[in-house]
Image: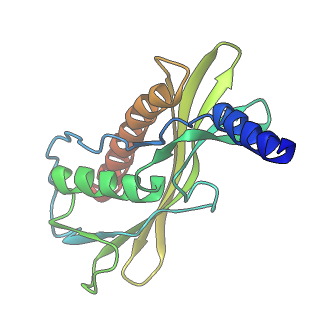
Amino acid sequence: MKKYLFLILMIVLSGCSIKSLPPTKSYTINTQIHIKNIAINHQKCKSIEINFPDSSNFIMSTNMIYVKGLQKNSYYFSKWYETPNQMLNDLFYAGLSQSRICKNTYSFGLTIPSDLILKSQILDFSQKFIGNHSFSEVKIIFFLINKDNLLIAQKEFDAKVICDTNNAQGGVKALSKASKQITSKMINWLHKILDK
């Protein structure tokens, strides 16, 4: 009888100690961008293909990365809806399409030959904490390649935006702004190269 009473007591007490975890929130950067149409002589660039951005496996995941001191971590209850690579690819495509730098803009995976290929390597896409403040940083290097697979130019861009709040949501807002700044810088860089 004591064994059964002890077993029932353990089941009741263990039920009281189970805590429910908060649900995981999914975030995405805002890929809506407004770029001025800066169409140039389309004889120089009839088409450009945007290759899928490359990165380390740590960045190419749905984990939301933050850095404190020398440690890289990810939020437990906040995730990206898509990888930063996919979100940035969508943003680059939207920006280049609106800019009309080239007559046609293609996304990766199409078998349509292009005059130019834009490759990119994401070096940083994270929220960083310093003391009681945080900022988000996006750092990307771009490579412009011609149809003969020769490098025309390369350029690294970095954008840092202070977070409104020191949490995942504040990091997402700042990463959205930083990503748009990088996209605008990349388009201006391409414009200078192709408008010569």
Quadrant in which residue 177 is drawn: top left
In the image: residue 186, left or right of residue 10: left
Quadrant placement of the N terminus: top right
| In the image, residue 115 above or below residue 183 | below
Task: Locate residue 91, reporting x and y percent.
Answer: 31, 51
Q: How is the image coloured?
A: rainbow
Quadrant placement of the C terminus: bottom left
In the image: residue 41, left or right of residue 56: left
Task: Locate residue 171, reporting x and y percent.
Answer: 50, 30
Quadrant in which residue 58 is drawn: bottom right
Front one among 56 and 172? 172
Front one among 133 and 4? 4
**The furthest residue to the top:** 132
| In the image, residue 44 above or below residue 38 | below
Q: Residue at x 44, y 34 (%)?
A: 172
Task: Locate residue 79, reporting x and y percent.
Answer: 50, 46
Task: Locate residue 9, reporting x and y percent.
Answer: 75, 36
Q: Residue at x 46, y 56 (%)?
A: 83
How many numbered marks have been drawn onto this rendered protein structure?
A: 0
Front one among 5 and 74? 5
**The furthest residue to the front:** 1
Q: Residue at x 63, y 62 (%)?
A: 57
Q: Residue at x 33, y 41 (%)?
A: 184
In the image: residue 147, left or right of residue 127: left
